[in-house]
Image: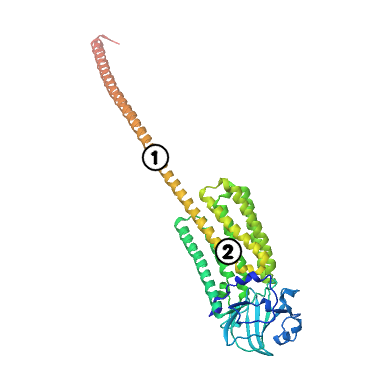
């Protein structure tokens, strides 16, 4: 069951990886946790596939770890640790390490191999013992004399392997595992709660910056899950190399969300088209880096070169984003400046991780999930506050606009009523004039009709008189 919750916390002994003195024999009962590097002798095998017996035959070629001059980081390295002070009774111990892709443990009692186990980041789950994990072996340490640990390390990620093996008691190992699970649970759980909160806020408000914040949280959160080894254990137990390919691309997804958030929340296309143009260039560069990283990891497993490329591109991106904050600061309102505070936190976390990655190389993966998770929480809290402030300002502006619109509508109604009243009076006056004109026309028509009737009567009378005169004269006319 322990194999399902692998990658123990090994930060404490990282402080001692740079300096130690060689010791001859190991006393496994001296302490709850013992750094094995001072007791190691190491040999870089000239070829792959050697057996443990063949490696022991070259015991004279083993040198102290601080005298090793490695030729190829992908070589097979054999580590020999003598145990000449056995405990009085059998006790369960855990042999832990970090980041090594393929590791095999042999415990020899004189010339006989009494225990053989396999582990490693890229080891198939079916090849790992039930009580072991990808980064630890658990076994009973027998009270036998003449024992020696022989460890084969084959690191395929093109990093120089760090032989940070540590021997812990069962109680110490359990404390470290519980501490790690608690930190991971609370950190990833907090990110998940913020993700759900912003998802609900997006569905309720429809405010688009919440979508970009969701992309950021998803990318950074999945990057932490992947670096913690959970993605491999949950979904790629039999094909861990494929599961590890997604790690850097989750980080790319988070960076892509930050770019979109800057563009949209600060309205760069309208306010700063010059910065918007360069941010689009950075997005294209991010896509190219993502493709190159995938090709390097998938075809060559050169995670070292991939990491160096991403370190350079991320440093440039951080510098440009900080420059954008500096340039846009005078034009930003109170809500938009909260994003600047969050970006400063992310920039500090990213730069510290880049510096630590340059110094500690692959071992920076041990602290990266916690640094990115904590900085992400700070950024989400600040930006969520900024979004709430932005929504509050929008609501205030909306209410002000509604009040102004209502006042304008009221004024418009008054003007309209005045116009209607004035027009009504004009219509009434026009109607009265029309009525008066109608009466005058009626009277005029009546007078004209009377005159016409009188004219007709007089004409009739005249015609009647002419007819009478003609009738009187007609008998006297002979022609």
Location of residue 179 in the rendering, given as x and y in whole percent from the top left corner: 53, 72
Depicted 355 relative to depicted 25: above or below: above
Location of residue 163 in the rendering, given as x and y in whole percent from the top left corner: 67, 75
Circle 2 residues within 10 Å: few <14, some 14–19, many ≥20: some
Numbered disc 1: secondary structure? helix
- The residue to which callout 1 is attached is 407
Q: Residue at x 53, y 80 (%)?
A: 1
The CA distance from mark 1 to mark 2 is 53 Å
Between 471 and 455, which is closer to the camera in this rendering? 455
Direction from residue 91 to residue 207 in the image, left or right: left
Between 22 and 346, which is closer to the camera in this rendering? 22
Which of marks 2 and 1 precedes in the sequence? 2
- Mark yes or no: residue 219 visible: no
Report the disc number at residue 371: 2
Location of residue 468 in the rendering, given as x and y in whole percent from the top left corner: 23, 13
Depicted 227 relative to depicted 84: above or below: above
Numbered disc 2: secondary structure? helix
Direction from residue 126 to residue 335 in the image, left or right: left
For marks 1 and 2, give the one nearer the viewer. 2
- Choose top left, top right, bottom left or bottom right for residue 10: bottom right
């Amino acid at each position: 069951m322990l194999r399902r919750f692998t990658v123990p916390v090994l930060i404490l002994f990282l402080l001692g990886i740079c300096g130690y003195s060689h010791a001859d024999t190991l006393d496994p009962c001296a302490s709850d946790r013992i750094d094995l590097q001072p007791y190691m002798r190491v040999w870089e095998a000239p070829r792959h596939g050697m057996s443990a017996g063949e490696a022991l035959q070259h015991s004279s070629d083993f040198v102290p770890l601080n005298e090793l001059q490695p030729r190829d980081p992908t070589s097979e390295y054999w580590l020999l640790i003598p145990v000449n002070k056995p405990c009085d009774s059998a006790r369960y111990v855990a042999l832990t390490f970090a980041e090594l892709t393929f590791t095999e443990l042999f415990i020899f009692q004189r010339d006989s191999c009494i225990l053989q186990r396999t582990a490693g980041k890229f080891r198939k789950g079916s090849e790992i013992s039930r009580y072991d994990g990808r980064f630890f072996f658990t076994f009973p340490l027998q009270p036998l004399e003449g024992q020696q640990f022989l460890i084969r390390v084959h690191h395929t990620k093109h990093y120089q392997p760090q032989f940070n093996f540590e021997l812990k008691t069962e109680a110490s190992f359990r404390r470290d595992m519980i501490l790690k699970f608690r930190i991971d649970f609370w950190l990833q759980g907090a990110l998940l709660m913020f993700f759900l909160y912003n998802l609900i806020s997006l569905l309720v408000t429809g405010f688009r910056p919440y979508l970009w914040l969701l992309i950021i949280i998803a990318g950074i959160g999945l990057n932490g899950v992947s670096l913690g080894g959970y993605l491999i254990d949950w979904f790629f137990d039999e094909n861990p190399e494929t599961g590890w390919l997604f790690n850097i691309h989750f980080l790319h997804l988070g960076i892509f969300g930050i770019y979109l958030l800057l563009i949209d929340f600060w309205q760069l296309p309208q306010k700063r088209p010059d910065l918007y143009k360069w941010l689009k260039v950075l997005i294209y560069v991010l896509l190219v880096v993502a493709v190159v990283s995938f090709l390097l990891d998938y075809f060559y497993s050169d995670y070292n070169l991939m990491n160096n490329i991403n370190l350079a591109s991320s440093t440039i991106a951080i510098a440009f984003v900080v420059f954008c904050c500096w340039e846009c600061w005078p034009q930003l309102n109170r809500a938009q400046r909260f994003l600047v505070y969050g970006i400063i936190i992310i920039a500090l976390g990213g730069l510290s991780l880049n510096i630590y990655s340059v110094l500690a190389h692959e071992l920076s993966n041990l602290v990266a999930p916690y640094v990115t998770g904590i900085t992400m929480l700070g950024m989400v809290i600040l930006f969520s506050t900024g979004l709430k402030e932005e929504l509050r300002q929008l609501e205030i502006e909306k209410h002000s606009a509604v009040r102004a619109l209502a006042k304008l509508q009221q004024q418009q109604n008054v003007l309209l009523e005045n116009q209607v009243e004035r027009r009504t009076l004009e219509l009434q006056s026009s109607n009265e004039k029309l009525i008066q004109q109608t009466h005058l026309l009626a009277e005029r028509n009546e007078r004209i009709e009377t005159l016409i009737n009188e004219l007709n009567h007089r004409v009739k009378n005249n015609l009647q008189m002419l007819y009478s005169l003609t009738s009187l004269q007609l008998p006297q006319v002979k022609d």
